[in-house]
Image: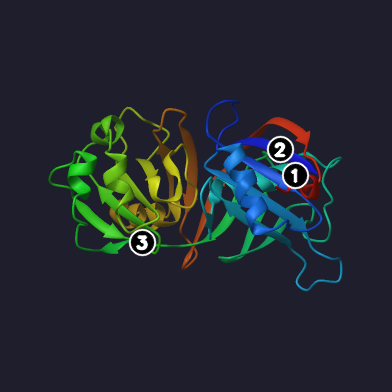
């Protein structure tokens, strides 16, 4: 069974967001997948299965697990999975779900498509998840150390907090216990990028202690909310977000298609190996 660790939304090893990618002919049990995700102890572990050649439409089946829970959408682990399928051809059965420039994934969030560009970047077609104004959850601002935010809203999965200065995002030291009590997958704090950051339009950080991820280094799915929000704020369809975690990473976004977001990034394999047959590892 092939197992890879890939740094996503970066071309530099040990930066961006690491994801484990487990490739198998069929999904192990949910309990086993959860145990492997806990063992890897990364924000997400992706499990990918090539479908039977007769399946219609042809696609890879893809699931994502944090160390404590299965999630219904993950950007960086999808990017990592597409990178593995294209770059590790000796170890991965391509099945019928990939062509020379595109891969289709069947997921809990519907059909997702990854496209490889001429320069080696990968574009992900994801559902938009724009945040709507919402009441501020009790204890949220105190937990973030934020006063007078510009906007507090909710996407389908997360709470989004727009603050007045990028330095507030950079210096945020949240109370993780307090954030864990908030009814949301995660908390996104964001601001317009500083003038000195020529390669980005906005900055963000993502905290998800409720799903076992205190801080996610670079969160592709969070940009499904950030992209439409900042597109409206800045009057632009194509933007660049920089997640200013300790590892950091860059996510290109495009909201030109209604109710969809294109996320663009690169990835690099850090290690590749094999894992024992799941049956041998069952407790």
User: Looking at the image, which residue is at 22% across and 57% down?
Assistant: 137
- Residue at the image point whose x is 64% and y is 58% from the top: 30
Disc 3 on helix, strand or loop?
loop
Which residue in the protein does label 3 denote? 155
Quadrant location of the N terminus? top right
**In-image side of 58 versus 259 (left or right):** right
Q: What element carries label 2?
A: strand
Marks 2 and 1 sit apart, C-alpha to C-alpha, by 18 Å
Q: Earlier in the sequence, mark 3 or mark 1?
A: 3
Decide if residue 4 is in sight here. yes
Number of the label disc, if any, that sits on residue 281:
1
What is the x, y in percent for residue 76? 56, 45
- Of 101 and 175, nearer the camera is 175
Q: What element carries label 1?
A: helix
The 10 Å Cα crowd at callout 2, few under 14, some 14 to 19, many 20 or more, is: many
Q: Which of marks 2 and 1 is nearer the N terminus?
A: 2
């Amino acid at each position: 069974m092939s197992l890879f660790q890939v740094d996503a939304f970066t071309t530099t090893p040990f930066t961006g967001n690491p994801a484990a990618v487990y490739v198998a002919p069929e999904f192990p049990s949910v309990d086993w997948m959860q145990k492997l995700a806990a063992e890897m102890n990364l924000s997400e572990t992706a499990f990918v299965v090539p479908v039977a050649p007769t399946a219609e439409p042809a696609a890879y089946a893809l699931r994502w697990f944090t160390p404590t829970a299965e999630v219904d959408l993950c950007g960086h682990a999808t990017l990592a999975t597409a990178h593995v399928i294209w770059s590790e051809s000796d170890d991965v059965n391509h099945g019928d779900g990939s062509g020379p420039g595109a891969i289709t994934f069947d997921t809990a969030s519907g059909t997702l498509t990854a496209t490889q560009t001429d320069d080696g970047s990968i574009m992900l077609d994801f559902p938009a998840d724009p945040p709507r104004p919402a009441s501020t959850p009790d204890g949220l601002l105190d937990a973030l150390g934020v006063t007078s935010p510009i906007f507090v809203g909710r996407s389908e999965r997360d709470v989004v907090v727009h603050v007045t200065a990028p330095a507030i995002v950079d210096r945020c030291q949240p109370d993780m216990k307090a954030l864990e009590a908030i009814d949301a997958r995660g908390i996104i704090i964001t601001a317009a990028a500083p003038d000195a950051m020529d390669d980005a339009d906005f900055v963000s950080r993502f905290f998800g202690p409720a799903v076992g991820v205190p801080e996610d280094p670079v969160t592709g799915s969070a940009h499904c909310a950030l992209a439409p929000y900042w597109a409206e704020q800045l009057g632009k369809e194509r933007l660049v977000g920089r997640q200013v975690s300790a590892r950091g990473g860059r996510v290109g976004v495009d909201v030109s298609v209604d109710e969809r977001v294109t996320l663009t990034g690169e990835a690099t394999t850090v290690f590749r190996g094999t894992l024992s047959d799941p049956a041998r590892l069952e407790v």
